[in-house]
Image: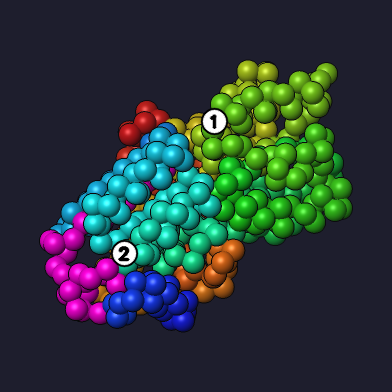
Amino acid sequence: MYNRRTFMLGATATAAALGLAACGGEGAGSGGPDTDAAPSEQTVGVAMPTQTYERWVADGDNIKKGLEEKGFTVDMQYAGDDIPTQQQQIDQMINSGVSALLIASIDGASLSSQLDAAAAVGIPVIAYDRLLTDSENVDFYVTFDNYTVGVNQANALLFGLGLLDESFEPSPDAPEGPLNVELFAGSLDDNNAHLFWQGAIDTLQPFFDDGTLEVPSGQMDIDQAATQRWEQETAQKRMETLLTTHYAGGKEIDGVLAPADPLSRGILNALQNAGRGDTIEDGLPIVTGQDAEIASIKLIADGVQHSTIFKDTRNLAEQAIISTESILTGEEPEANDTETYDNGVKVVPSYLLEVQMVLQSNYEEILVETGYYTEEQVEAGQL
Ligand code: BGC
């Protein structure tokens, strides 16, 4: 259930600060959105982090198209993964009088003064995919089930290593181990990175505890495994260093938990360059992923990357638009989780979408037969 009290707290605090009546259909005062305004009179500000990850480009395109189809004007900006740029872009959207803000942050905690400024003039804020933290002024959150992403990544790794069977139950033919794995996490300033990690570690922990899995580097804290700004090159370099430092003399490495496809590809480059096999069949370790990027789907089809997690950004964009419309017409957006996403100041009511594990055995069914990618795109490894 949507937490009405939390939403009203934000609105009431704003109205009180300005000495205004609470928002309603009374015209576009600064106490909240003008709930009578037609979409054609409204601009939605959309702040996106970067274009270097394929998904954010797709998210942006889908949001823009969907909002425009509803009649809204869209002010969409990408920030090149630079925090001050994103702050300025949002400042500018607020100054130009947008009706609502949809924000996929770079650093979830870095936008508090922008969120305060938006609240002061009654602009509702929806966090998109990544939670906005340390602020009261976040009205709603649309995202995927991020903890389950991590669970699925770990299950894919365990399946690839032969420890789980196709039903993800302990395999009767499991190797005894110990098997050697290394762990990678995303950017620490992205709240999602922590949920992916938690889901994965909770799932792997029993296998560490009984000695089936080992991490020869000993780097088992998220701080040690993190990849600042989710950069591919950083992950590749860390993998190279891990190999030279902890796997000298051809010591076996069996698998790598990788939290996003560009990082997976960096890790695979490092493994291949170090002569650790070209495909899984000839000994390349099991490497997981996330986002179902086209280049990684080709690698999965070719037996190089083991798996990824598909998060249908078309659905996320659609959900973001539905939530925006609800808020702009004075309704409570529909939430399906009002417990998980505590941003340090309040629990932000959220709508979570489901995710799917993609393997060589099911990528056609999940991604090609549904029209997400064509067979030609998979063959070419590009859109
Ligand atoms: C998103 C992932 C993405 C990562 C890097 C996360 O916040 O949820 O889908 O791979 O950021 O851009």
**Dominant SS in magenta:** loop
| Spot occupied by residue 152 in the image (x, y as percentages of width and height) | 60, 54
User: Can you name the residue that lies furthest to the right here?
Assistant: 210
Q: Is residue 63 left or right of residue 204?
A: left
* First reached walking from the N terminus: tag 1 or tag 2: 2
Q: Secondary structure at mark 2?
A: loop
Task: Write down the residue under mark 2.
Answer: 121
Q: Which residues are magenta?
A: 24-49
- The quadrant the C terminus occupies is top left
Kindly tell me whether residue 28 is visible in this rendering.
Answer: yes
Is residue 279 left or right of 202 when viewed as pictured?
A: left
Q: In 3D space, how far apart are the residues under numbered discs 1 and 2 (Cα atoms)?
A: 39 Å
Q: Is residue 10 magenta?
A: no
Dot 1 amino acid type = Gln
Mark carried by residue 232: 1
Residue in front for this viewpoint, 260 or 1: 1
Q: On screen, 73 above or below 123? A: above
Give the percent coordinates (x, y) of residue 280: 63, 32
The amino acid sitting under disc 2 is Val
Horizontal relation, residue 19 to residue 13: left or right: left
